[in-house]
Image (spheres, rainbow, N blue to C red):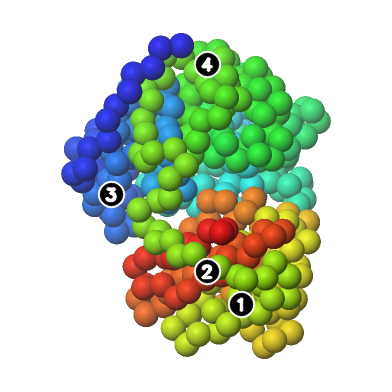
Amino acid sequence: MSLKRLPITSYMTEFSKLGLSPTTLQAVADTGYTTATPIQEQAIPVALAGRDVLGIAQTGTGKTAAFTLPMVDRLGSGRARARMPRALVLAPTRELADQVAESFGKYARGTKLNWALLIGGVSMGEQVALLDKGVDVLIATPGRLLDLFERGKILLTGVEIMVVDEADRMLDMGFIPDIERIFKLTPPRRQTLFFSATMPPEITRLTQQFLKDPTRIEASRPAMTADTIAQYLVRIPSSDPKAKRTALRALVGREDVKNGIVFCNRKSEVDVVAKSLKQHGFDAAPIHGDLDQSLRTKTLASFRSGELKLLVASDVAARGWTSRTSATSSTTTSRTTPTTMCTASAAPAARARRVRPS
């Protein structure tokens, strides 16, 4: 597999110069955006030309629009058939898949394209009904997609465009065998848009096996924190879990902390930390993969609306979230580990502060 590497430029390019159709440009304008991020600037023209893309991009760089916008344009001239989607987007978590579906809904508003969101934790009935009518785009988690395929509800032989989002997280969650199987179920002639924050050997092997002469685009250096995040380290003298939770409460209890996300590396820790915060009078709620999907959706909606102040989440459940805060609020992030807890301090409205383990 040969790679064409495109450098990321520092200037901003208007969407109108990227080759998108007037209908799609209007949809972008309706969202309030006029200039493309670096990953969008480089990936959109390549994807519009029908070539494979290998995007090395972190969450928050705008990569969802980098594959959604050209997909809307490229699918505009055809029509869907029952149980035979024309495009497939794979995401590692239900929340990320839902976010992609939300973006697709905005950008495809002026077209006749339709789509279906296939995620676990909800009834298959409505999903199957949509598939029977015919959908242009499937946005799915690997498990639910294969479950419906094995039941004979989906045929993937008509897929023209396949997107793999957050591939390195797929690896972390053990989805690589599923991804390989799904690739083999789609036509070899498909266009592939493949995105990953990092490129470990297993991910590199996947791209070499299934991508055709892709253009490699790096929006940021691998394993580096996004520029929109300022990091602060708080050292805790004791590894005792109670001491760590005490330190966390002291920091999130500051007046200038309006809302925040507490990241934990285990689901059991999520429950413990959320319970501790609530017992001490904080407005907090947990979210992780073992909770019912309806509860997860309700909790996330409450946090996004500002009704919930503190969200305690596992890394996997939180990957790819988009959360908007008001001009006067601040977003905080913290992570707990078995030996060290990193707690959060307040952040200016425009910059989230992330603190890492010591």
Q: Percent position (x, y) of residue 9? A: 22, 38
How far, Cα to Cα, is label 1 from label 4? Answer: 46 Å
How far, Cα to Cα, is label 1 from label 2? Answer: 9 Å
Q: Earlier in the sequence, mark 1 or mark 3?
A: 3
Judge depth for marks 4 and 3 and give the one in front.
4
Q: Which residue in the structure is indicated by mark 2?
A: 234
Tell me the amino acid under the disc marked 3. Answer: Gln
Mark 2 neighbour class, 10 Å CA radius: few under 14, some 14 to 19, many 20 or more: some
Q: Percent position (x, y) of residue 196? A: 50, 36
Q: Earlier in the sequence, mark 4 or mark 3?
A: 3
* Residue ID at (78%, 56%): 290
Secondary element at image label 4:
helix
Q: Percent position (x, y) of residue 181? A: 69, 22
Look at the numbered discs 3 and 2 and tell me whether their residues touch, using CB distance below 8 Å.
Answer: no
* Residue ID at (62%, 54%): 315
Q: Is residue 121 above or below residue 312?
A: above
Mark 1 neighbour class, 10 Å CA radius: few under 14, some 14 to 19, many 20 or more: some
How far, Cα to Cα, is label 4 from label 3? Answer: 36 Å
Q: Is residue 184 above or below residue 115?
A: above
How far, Cα to Cα, is label 4 from label 2? Answer: 41 Å
Secondary element at image label 2:
loop
Q: Earlier in the sequence, mark 3 or mark 2?
A: 3
Query: Left or right of 118: which side holds 349?
Result: left
Q: Earlier in the sequence, mark 4 or mark 2?
A: 4
In the current view of this chain or complex, which residue is farthest to the right? Answer: 151
Look at the numbered discs 1 and 2 and tell me whether their residues touch, using CB distance below 8 Å.
Answer: yes
Judge depth for marks 4 and 2 and give the one in front.
2
Tell me the amino acid under the disc marked 1. Answer: Ala
Secondary element at image label 1:
helix
Q: Which residue in the structure is indicated by mark 1?
A: 247
Placement of the C terminus among the 4 image quadrants: bottom right
Tell me the amino acid under the disc marked 2. Answer: Val
